[in-house]
Image (cartoon, helix red, strand yellow):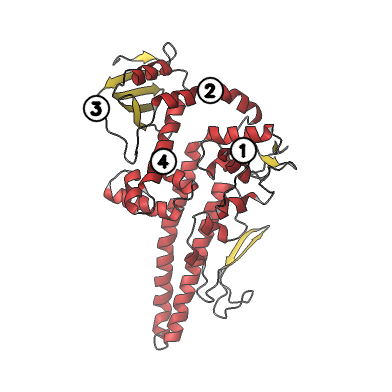
């Protein structure tokens, strides 16, 4: 079994079934061009995997999409992870934000999707190296290889039918006048953000989750970005809902239709991280610069010094919110309707939205020219000449 074999000549399913039936322990290595996937088995059960197409960062993304972590908390964890040089699942678990059980579920989902991708491979080579292996960090229970094989085969059978209704990830669906019993036509964003759950007779949890995100504006790709469900589960849910008459494809896709390229998504995430770090540095420099210029003349007046500080903090808050709005637009193709969406979806914490001059949220308007974010300024009144943008 240690010899290299061709996928086109001997299918991967056969070797995986043999590993399962003989309760083998070791590492299956699959090479398809530049892509190299390793799958670890212990006593015939799946306990780990690595795949460049599914980086370990997906575990954190799944927890954010599942509302178990906020984006801010994940960035904090990743910072500590880099410092401590430990695995992301372990860093998440040690943070205390998420229970071991939830981390284990996310890791299992991550491994399951790597395994499902094996069924899509038509070419390449593979080899199995018997050896002792350890479970992947964060995994609580080994995954049943038998169940995964059955699921993989079922997906292969269903994909052709799903693709007839969901041919690509740029398709946009709208709700029809036929509404599932137990659900209404409330805008999808409210369903997603309030964390509500519904019990609908005749619909699976997968279909309910997908239905709540169908709004005539989101692409299939955008729906995938807002749910921990896999690509197959989202597409299957949309296909079932369309077949039942609850949703229908829009005749035209919105201008913000997103790409299916996962590398592009990671580029956006990296860009947002760099912008956040750069803005934090600029904000600190701005405060020091303004204070250093005005502090001499205002030092004798505590009230004056306080106003300089509030002005600097207001400018920093405006710039931070502006960056978050840009990040939101990069991820979803449009600006948030109101600033509260940034908090509910993990882009900012609520304190960042506060205007230092009024204690209320910063002003925010979406116009044809873009997004206008500003502070009321020293007089505490919006719409006057001292507003800070």
Near-viewer residue (203 or 29): 203
Q: Helix, strand or loop at disc 2?
A: helix
**Residue at 49% in and 62% down:** 320
Using the numbered discs, state the Cα–Cα distance from disc 1 to disc 3 in whole angstroms: 43 Å
Contact check, label 1 and label 2, Cβ < 8 Å? no
First of labels 2, 3 by sequence position: 3
Residue 65 on image: x %, y %: 49, 46
The furthest residue to the bottom: 300
Residue that badge 2 annotates: 156
Residue that badge 3 annotates: 132
Near-viewer residue (305 or 28): 28
First of labels 4, 2 by sequence position: 4
Contact check, label 1 and label 3, Cβ < 8 Å? no
178 to the left or right of 308? right
- Tell me the mark number nearer the camera, choosing from 4 and 2: 4
Residue 105 numbered tag: 4
């Amino acid at each position: 079994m240690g010899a290299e074999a061709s996928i086109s000549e001997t299918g991967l399913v056969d070797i995986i079934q043999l590993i399962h039936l003989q309760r083998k322990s070791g590492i299956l290595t699959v090479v398809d061009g530049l892509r190299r996937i390793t799958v670890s088995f212990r006593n015939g059960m799946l306990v780990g995997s690595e795949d460049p197409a599914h980086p370990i960062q997906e575990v954190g993304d799944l927890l954010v999409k599942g509302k178990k972590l906020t984006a801010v908390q994940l960035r904090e964890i990743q910072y500590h992870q880099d410092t401590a040089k430990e695995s992301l699942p372990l860093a998440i678990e040690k943070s205390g934000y998420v229970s071991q059980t939830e981390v284990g579920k996310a890791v299992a989902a991550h491994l399951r999707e790597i395994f499902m991708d094996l069924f899509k491979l038509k070419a390449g080579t593979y080899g199995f190296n018997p050896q002792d292996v350890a479970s992947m960090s964060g995994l609580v229970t080994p995954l049943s290889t038998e169940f995964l094989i059955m699921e993989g085969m079922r997906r292969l059978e269903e994909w052709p039918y799903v693709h007839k209704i969901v041919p690509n990830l740029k398709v946009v669906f709208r709700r029809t006048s036929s509404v599932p019993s137990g659900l209404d036509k409330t805008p999808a964003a409210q369903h997603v953000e309030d964390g509500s759950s519904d019990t609908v007779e005749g619909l699976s949890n997968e279909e309910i989750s997908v239905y709540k995100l169908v709004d005539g504006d989101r692409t299939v790709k955008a729906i995938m970005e807002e749910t921990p469900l896999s690509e197959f589960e989202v597409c299957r849910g949309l296909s079932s809902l369309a077949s039942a008459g609850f949703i229908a494809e829009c005749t035209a896709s919105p201008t913000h239709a997103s790409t299916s390229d996962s590398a592009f998504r990671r580029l956006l995430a990296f860009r947002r991280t760099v912008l956040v770090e750069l803005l934090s540095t600029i904000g600190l420099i701005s405060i020091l610069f303004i204070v250093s210029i005005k502090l001499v003349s205002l030092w004798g007046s505590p009230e004056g010094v306080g106003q300089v500080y509030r002005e600097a903090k207001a400018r920093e808050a405006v710039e931070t919110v502006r960056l978050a709005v840009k990040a939101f637009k990069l991820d979803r193709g449009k600006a948030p309707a109101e600033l509260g969406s940034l908090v509910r979806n993990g882009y900012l914490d609520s304190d960042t939205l506060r205007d230092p001059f009024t204690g209320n949220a910063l002003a925010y308007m979406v116009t044809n020219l873009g997004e206008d974010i500003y502070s009321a300024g020293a007089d505490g009144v919006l719409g006057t000449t001292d507003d800070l943008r």
